[in-house]
Image (cartoon, grey):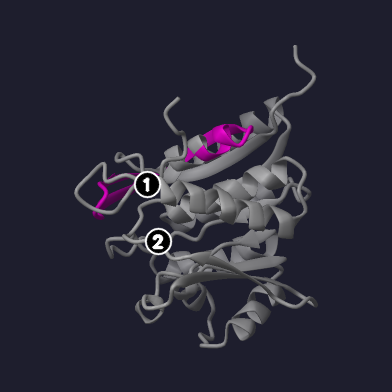
């Protein structure tokens, strides 16, 4: 057996039948970056490239058993969390994370579909705050998600960052580009916050169109680079660079948003 084993990233995400987002985005991203994805589905959805119309959560106890056998069988280098769907799923995952405090946790807080459907009610949001933020290495919300996750919304991102850090979340990456107010800007700015350090702003040329699965791709890429041994700031930068490339190559595979191409044709 090869000594150069691919690092294992445990991914807990929803199933998107269109393949643009969710667990397929995780698998494709991790495979293309040299990691092995151990995929656990948290929710089943009825969705396409336009919107989500239905969501059904997997039994939390079943997710717990899946996580247990993976941890018993494999060395997990990072854990990536996406769509949760219910408080039961959130708390079940948090209970398992409690037993593995030294593994980096990367969260993409999927609160709303790109088509507008709400995917997390206030109880789920509160459960994320209480049970997952204290265990999180980095969380990657867009500006709207960052506002919703804070009990004290603010237009000052630095103030929002203070809240996340106070809850135990080590790093906060607020992604730009989704706000209508930013649409006229030629660049998209993503800002990384770490307690006690100046924020790191990264600017990327704005691409035409809307994209389905960009947030999933970004968080999975951060997970990959962390699993491969990069420090957080470097992992976050390289993940943005990778994601920007997948968006440049995105294709209109459906009637809605463009789908990032994470595995180019040979």
**Which residue occupies 53% across, 40% down?**
29
Q: Is residue 224 left or right of residue 15?
A: right
User: What is the x, y in percent for residue 178?
Assistant: 40, 70
Dominant secondary structure of the magenta stretch?
A: strand
Counting from the top left corner in percent of width and height, residue 190 is at 56, 69
Question: Was residue 32 drawn as part of the magenta stretch in this picture?
Answer: yes
Residue 37, by quadrant, is top right
Q: Is residue 201 visible?
A: yes
Among all residues in the image, which is located at the extreme top?
A: 1
Instruction: Name the element at disc 1.
Output: loop
Earlier in the chain: of badge 1 and badge 2, it is 2
At label 2, counting other C-alpha atoms closer than 10 Å, the crowd grade (few under 14, some 14-19, many 20 or more) is: some
Q: Is residue 221 magenta?
A: no
Residue at image x 55%, y 41%? 11
17 left or right, relative to 142: left
Estimate the x, y position of residue 173 in percent, counting from the top left.
60, 66
The quarter in which the C terminus is drawn is top left
Q: Secondary structure at mark 2?
A: loop
Q: Which residue is mark 1?
A: 250
Disc 1 and disc 2: Cα gap in Å?
A: 10 Å
Seen from the viewer's position, the closer of residues 94 and 180 is: 180
Q: What segment is highlighted magenta in the picture?
A: 29-57
Q: Nearer the viewer, residue 59 or 148?
A: 148
Residue at 63 percent across and 47 percent down: it is 223
CB-based contact (under 8 Å), mark 1 and mark 2: yes
Q: Nearer the viewer, residue 68 or 250?
A: 250
Establish if 152 lies above or below 180: below
In the rendering, which numbered label is found on residue 207? Answer: 2
């Amino acid at each position: 057996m090869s000594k150069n084993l691919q690092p294992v990233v445990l991914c807990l995400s929803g199933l998107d039948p269109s393949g643009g987002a969710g667990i397929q985005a995780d698998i494709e991203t991790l495979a293309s970056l040299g990691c092995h994805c151990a995929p656990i589905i948290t929710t089943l959805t009825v969705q396409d490239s336009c919107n989500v119309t239905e969501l059904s959560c997997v039994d939390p106890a079943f997710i717990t058993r899946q996580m247990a056998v993976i941890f018993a069988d494999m060395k997990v280098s990072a854990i990536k969390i996406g769509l949760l769907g219910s408080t039961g799923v959130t708390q079940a995952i948090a209970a398992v994370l409690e037993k593995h405090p030294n593994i980096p946790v990367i969260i993409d807080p999927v609160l709303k579909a790109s088509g507008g459907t709400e995917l997390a009610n206030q109880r789920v949001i509160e459960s994320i705050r209480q049970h997952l933020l204290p265990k999180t290495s980095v969380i990657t919300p867009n500006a709207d998600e960052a506002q919703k996750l804070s009990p004290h919304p603010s237009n000052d991102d630095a103030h929002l960052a203070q809240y996340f850090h106070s809850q135990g979340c080590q790093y906060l990456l607020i992604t730009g580009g989704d706000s209508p107010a930013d649409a006229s800007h030629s660049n998209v700015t993503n800002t990384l916050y770490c307690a006690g350090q100046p924020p790191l702003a990264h600017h990327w040329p704005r691409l035409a169109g809307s994209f389905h699965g960009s947030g999933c791709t970004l968080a999975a890429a951060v997970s990959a680079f962390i699993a491969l041994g990069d420090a957080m700031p470097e992992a976050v930068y390289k993940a943005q660079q990778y994601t920007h490339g997948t968006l440049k190559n995105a294709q209109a595979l459906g009637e809605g948003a463009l789908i990032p191409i994470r595995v180019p044709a040979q």
